[in-house]
Amino acid sequence: MSYSSTRGASNLTTAEGQGTVRVAIVGTGFGQKVHIPGFKDHPRTEVVAVYHRDIDKAEAIAKTNDIPFAVNTIEDIAKMENLEAVSISTPPFLHYEMAKPILAAGKHLLLEKPTTLSASEAKELYQIATDKNVVTAMDFEFRFVPAWQRLKELLEQGYCGTLRLIKVDWLVASRADANRAWNWYAQKDKGGGALGAIGSHSFDYIPWLFGPVGRLCGHLSTAVAQRPDPAAGGQLKPVDADDTGMLMLQLRDGTPVQITLSSATYGGRGHWVEVYGDRGTLILGSDNLKDYVHGFKLWGAPAGEELTELEIPSRLAFEKTYPDGRIAPFIRTIDNWVRGIDAAKASAPSLLDGVYSQLLMDSTHESHATGRFVEIPTIEAFMAGG
């Protein structure tokens, strides 16, 4: 496959193989680690272009990954012919402005979380996608992890009965070191912070597993208040993005939910979801602090019995695993998206689910600012509102 930049070029050669979805990659951090290998391993997708604002870096990444086109403007991506889809994995403050022209050009979109900087931005993107009849997907990959899928099945089968309490702990050390560099993640107005990085996932899987949220109350804090900026010779700069959050939710059916999030906990217990009901208990968890997908196990106990580890059926197992645990569920995300493109209809997790996750994030910030519970509208009411 030949390689070139798009300086003066807007057309792509026809991809090999009938039914291939040709994809451009926008975002080369997480994009290089997860998106590019994921799309390359999916049998129905071909990576034909990569974006970086620095054309020299874009060309280097394209050459390394055998990608035919390198571009340094979103406009170049939007006007490419024979390009059906775009995957965006840039920092969240760039999502809205990058996704708008992509959707307006009628290209299908896979978007990393958190969705945007506000629910109103996310809603606008969804409306553009709807107007253009394009298929969207969000990379809420926990929906595609085998242990999580088994938890979903058991809940739907009534294993726990009527729910009494849901408890989520997600405690990791990714930002515990105060010497970790200051960047966009340290800035609230750039979409940084633990709420966006991991809370956005919780705000997707809670309604997926248990149902919509009726109201919530949240408190956010920042344990590491300064970080060194390498671009300023290591000068300490203020951090105003959260690294810890404590949330109380009440689902629309009345079930209470407690969530504790932190990216600043040395030796944190990892990621755990505990479900207590009148018929039994289910506990899903992983203490793997180096890979947030690998290591999940599931335990269950009918009422009055001891917890025992539950087997995950082989039918739910990944077809292939990778040293980076994020790649296998991402490939399933791609597969779900491609099936939606085939059917001309998005399936969850789509941009609509991204709107709802962002709405819950916005409501958490509102609750933190006011010190009060915030009532959450249904997604239908929010989308119909002005």
Image (cartoon, rainbow, N blue to C red):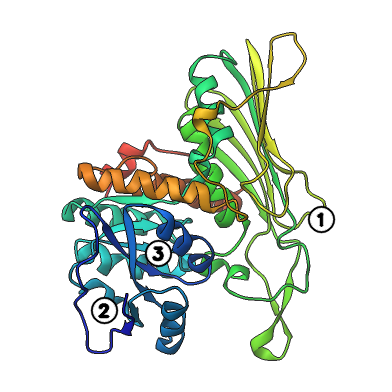
Residue at 30% over, 48% down: 338
Above/below status of 159 relative to 95: above
Which structural element holds mark 2? helix
Dot 3 or dot 1: first in sequence order is 3
Q: Is residue 363 left or right of residue 335?
A: right
Dot 2 or dot 3: first in sequence order is 2
Regarding residue 251, the answer to whether it shows in the image is: no
User: Rounded to the nearest whole Å, what is the CA distance between mark 2 and mark 3?
Assistant: 14 Å
Residue at 40% over, 64% down: 88
Of circles 3 and 1, the one toward us is 3
Residue identifier under label 3:
88
Residue at 27% over, 57% down: 21
Residue identifier under label 2:
76
Q: Position of residue 369 (x, y in %)?
A: 58, 54
Above/below status of 72 relative to 203: below
Residue identifier under label 1:
266
Dot 2 or dot 1: first in sequence order is 2
Which structural element holds mark 1? loop
Q: Amino acid at mark 3?
A: Ile
Asked whether the beta carbons under mark 2 and mark 1 sit within 8 Å of each other, the answer is no
Of circles 2 and 1, the one toward us is 2
Query: The N terminus appears in which quarter of the rendering?
Result: bottom left
Say which quarter of the image contains residue 41: bottom left
